[in-house]
Image: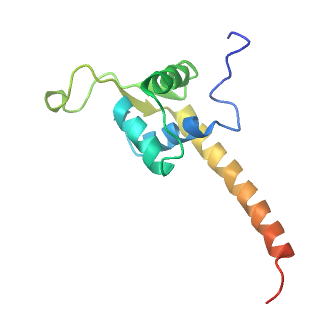
Amino acid sequence: MPPTRQSTTTLPLAPSVYLILLALADGDAHGYRLRAAVAERSDGMVTLDPGSLYRLIARLVDDGAIAEVPARARPENDDERRRYYRLTPAGRRLLEAETQRMANLVAVARGRTAKRAPSL
């Protein structure tokens, strides 16, 4: 791995990586659908241009977090140029670990907020 290449499987995950994995937790998806899901789930705060998206997809495949689906269920209803991706078991574990990490941070923040909140 080149020294300038950051792994996509090291916590904390970049928001775009987390959102791609989260979208794939719902099932197989092609690049355009992943791009739309990332924007939708982030309320437009995270948007990926096609170049960035496909670089991330390639890195996630290389890192074993996602895999290209070898065959589509209904190819007659789809564009043959589309490539579909799915979470691997390692990708699912990574998604769960990052979700738990963030939940723990939120719990800490809420605990501190509750302790500092003025009484009404």
x, y percent for residue 104? 73, 56
Q: Nearer the viewer, residue 84 or 109?
A: 109
Q: Is residue 5 above or below residue 89?
A: above
Task: Mark yes or no: residue 119 visible.
Answer: yes
Judge from the rendering whether residue 58 lies leftward or rightward of residue 103; answer left or right: left
Judge from the rendering whether residue 8 lies leftward or rightward of residue 58; answer left or right: right
Residue farthest toward the top in the current orientation of the protein: 2
Q: Nearer the viewer, residue 71 or 48?
A: 48
Residue farthest toward the left in the current orientation of the protein: 76
Task: Mark yes or no: residue 30 visible.
Answer: no
For residue 33, which quarter of the picture?
top left
For the point 83% across and 67% down, which residue is it?
112
Q: The C terminus lies in which quarter of the figure?
A: bottom right
Q: Is residue 70 above or below residue 21?
A: above
For residue 39, which quarter of the picture?
top left
x, y percent for residue 100? 67, 51
For the point 48% across and 25% down, which residue is it?
57
Query: How many circles with numbers are drawn on the protein?
Result: 0
For the point 50% across and 25% down, which residue is it?
52
For the point 48% across and 47% down, which residue is it?
44
x, y percent for residue 108? 79, 61
Q: How is the image coloured?
A: rainbow
x, y percent for residue 80? 22, 21
Judge from the rendering whether residue 76 lies leftward or rightward of residue 73; answer left or right: left
Q: Is residue 58 above or below residue 94?
A: above
Q: The N terminus lies in which quarter of the figure?
A: top right
For residue 10, which quarter of the picture?
top right
Q: Nearer the viewer, residue 100 or 82?
A: 82
